[in-house]
Amino acid sequence: MHVILLGTAAGGGFPQWNCWCPVCRVARRDPAAAHPRTQSSAAVSADGRHWFLLNASPDVRDQLRLIPAEAPVGNRQVPIEGVIATDAELDHTMGLALLREGRTLQFWSTTAVRDVLEEDSRILPVTRAFADVEWRELPLGRGVAITSRDGKASGLTLEAFAVAGDAPRFARHEHPGHTIGLEIRSAAGRRCLFIPGCGAIDPALAARMAGTDLVLFDGTFWTEHELIALGISDRPAAAMGHLPMSGPEGSLAQLSSLSGTRRVFTHINNSNPVLIENSDERAAVQAAGWIVGDDGMRFEL
């Protein structure tokens, strides 16, 4: 299985266009000291040729350049086989409308995510005005073999599982499956977990992570009250559906016994000091055996 991190920042990217927090200031002053990042997305493939997007960010146009593709014979090329969504947040789904020129788009999501995109954000109706959107259901707790656009087996199986999180603030209703993680399996039995948004780690999730080849996990905030301390927001991390990295209940502490697994933080907010290359927070993450995700990172399982 091949995995590419296309974007590793949370909503707004890094540095965020209107933000001058201490971390964004470093990125603006010295990009080598805090690498710019686009909004969270990844791509997976069984063979290195047929790629599937994990979430479609507003930065999808530039992110697609990271996916290897041969020059087409004709005048058009669609370098992806489809999109798989973990939620209906704008930073994970606005890219669907930007992919409208593909004319036909395979899209996998839970029913809850589809309903929000249909009725609340209206991203699916907008996209369907230009392209055929072939929606495929991701049932919770059951593996689904995904196919390429030509109907052939991709060699990958998806299993969606619910994780703690909030439905988008513009969603009128909240139903099971509004925020999920994805377990991606190859025919050879390799496993990758993609969990860009997660508000808590329960025993079932910890057990699922154990023995997984690669975990791409929510790295949004460093502390629970990060945005409050900066005067940016009055909401703690938990109220936004994210588990911070640090602290006795943070992801680093809760997953300290996880071994034999490559662990990568993604969906990192612009305020998180781990984005600074030589920060104490970055050193703590690395000492715990984690990688701070960066755009363009590649993994082979």
Image (cartoon, rainbow, N blue to C red):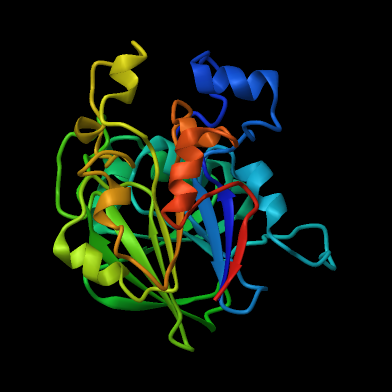
Residue that appears at 31% across and 39% down: 246
Residue that appears at 66% across and 74% down: 48
Task: Give percent across and percent down for residue 244.
Answer: 30, 39
Residue that appears at 44% across and 31% down: 272
Relative to 300, does residue 75 appear above or below in the rendering?
A: above
Q: Residue furthest top?
A: 231
Which quadrant is the C terminus positioned in? bottom right
Task: Give percent across and percent down for residue 86.
Answer: 35, 53
Horizontal arrangement in the rendering, residue 174 relative to residue 213 (left or right): left
Task: Give percent across and percent down for residue 167.
Answer: 23, 40
Task: Give percent across and percent down for residue 93.
Answer: 44, 43
The quarter of the displayed image where residue 289 is located: bottom left
Which quadrant is the N terminus positioned in? bottom right
Relative to 127, does residue 181 appear above or below in the rendering?
A: below
Relative to 263, does residue 229 appear above or below in the rendering?
A: above
Q: Residue furthest bottom?
A: 188
